[in-house]
Image: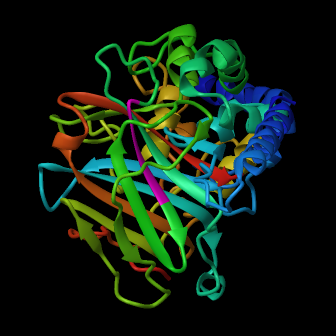
Amino acid sequence: MMKTNLKYLSAIVLFGTALVFSACDDDDNDMPVTTMYEQEDQMARPAINTVFVSTGEKDMFNTTTPAQQGAAFATKFKDKLLALNPGYTTNLLGLDATTFTGVLATDVLSVSLTAPTTFYDGTNVLTGRKLDDDVITVELILLFGGPDAMANPGLTDDHVDANDKTFLNSFPYLATPH
Amino acid sequence: MRLKLNLKSLGLALVVFVACAASYLIAADHIDAPAVTGTGSDITDVYAFQSPANSSNMVFVVNVQGLLAPSATAAASFDEEVMIEVNIDNSSTKDNMEDLVIQATFDNGKVKVFGPEAPAQKGLMSTLLKSTPAEATVTSYGANPVIGESNGIKVFAGPRDDPFFFDLNQFKAIIGGTATSFNNPGADAFAGTNVLALVIEVPKSMLGSDAINIWATSNRKM
């Protein structure tokens, strides 16, 4: 709904702009028209929209700025977390359900410019995301593993620990396509 | 025994509470939402890491159009109507508003990367930065990577192996109530598939001094 309104609004703005330009365009000068881009997809941490956002709101999540996501989605994320894991108390980071989902609902990736960059390497937590970080297992541990990562052992590791191709040490780092 | 029982009740709870969402539980961000699925603006993953080749640099990777079979990869192309943006909050308060953006556009087989620079406006609507871009020819399937470099910024765009790995199918089985745990070993549902990758390496000095928050967006030309 919001998106539709935005589209109408931008159509009106564009139409209005066109009228102004044509009114002033006496000598066929090429007036610089600024091209506008409208946001469609948005992502930071892996699997947030896919796991935590309900079916009817996935497009809305993608078109809500991170600064507004927390207010719009934190409660819904908490409900989803407790649906996925009714026994959730805290997790390895010591975060209770409200705190954890409050963090997740603002979908940004923290990146250190000084420390090692990793989703989680045993020491550093959420300082970036490397190509070989096993991000899904980290997220499963935080969702299902409880305060000591020992709960629900069948659900805390998908046992796919690495990519099917080796990454490169030089730019562009990603492996050649299949 | 008690653990097993708990797992079973958890499995039951999963069925009851999330079965209706199962069809949309896809992957990292691959085909995450109806409006972007199957389009050139569908982001699959975002990465940010210190350059393995130069510790003074940061690497950003934004992948789009995931789950490309090898047979479909040569024909896949970046959508020229879509601008990919890396949004960077380097404020001390971390207000999650973009203080800097890096923008990539695709035109006539070339990728152009603008920034990092303060955007003219923040939020859901964007205009292109006016600075001189770093450019590269989009690498075609099977060719050696074409790397553009300008002002210390490196650029690559083209098909690559999807770096994401996950036993998605077993996860869906658990969520769907037909399994109660992962297998060991698991099966990587993304093995053998490709994405269209955008890789940008920039000096950290252009980004901030300590820590930043980042997020990627795709934005369609109006």
Where is residue A81 drawn, in percent x and y?
A: 65, 22
Q: Is residue B103 magenta?
A: yes
Residue B175 part of the magenta segment:
no
Residue B70 position in % (x across, y down): 59, 84
Q: Residue at x 62, y 35 (%)?
A: B124
Residue B62 against residue B106 in the figure, above or below: above
Main SS, magenta region, reads: strand
Determine whether, in the image, residue B220 is placed left or right of residue B166: right
Q: Tell me, yes or no, if residue A175 can be seen here.
A: no
Which residue occupies 64% across, 30% down? B4
Residue B106 seen in render:
yes
Residue visible at 86% across and 37% down?
Answer: A8
Residue depicted at 16% across the width and 41% down the height:
B205
Residue toward you, B216 or A110: B216
Q: Quadrant of residue B107?
A: bottom right
Which of these two is toward me, A157 or B80?
Answer: B80
Tell me residue B173's x, y (percent): 74, 49
Q: Quadrant of the N terminus of chain A?
A: top right
On screen, residue A150 versus residue B166, left or right, reads left
Q: Position of residue B109 (x, y in %)?
A: 51, 80
Q: Quadrant of residue B111?
A: bottom left
The segment highlighted magenta reads B99-104
**Up/down of A152 relative to A33, above or below:** above
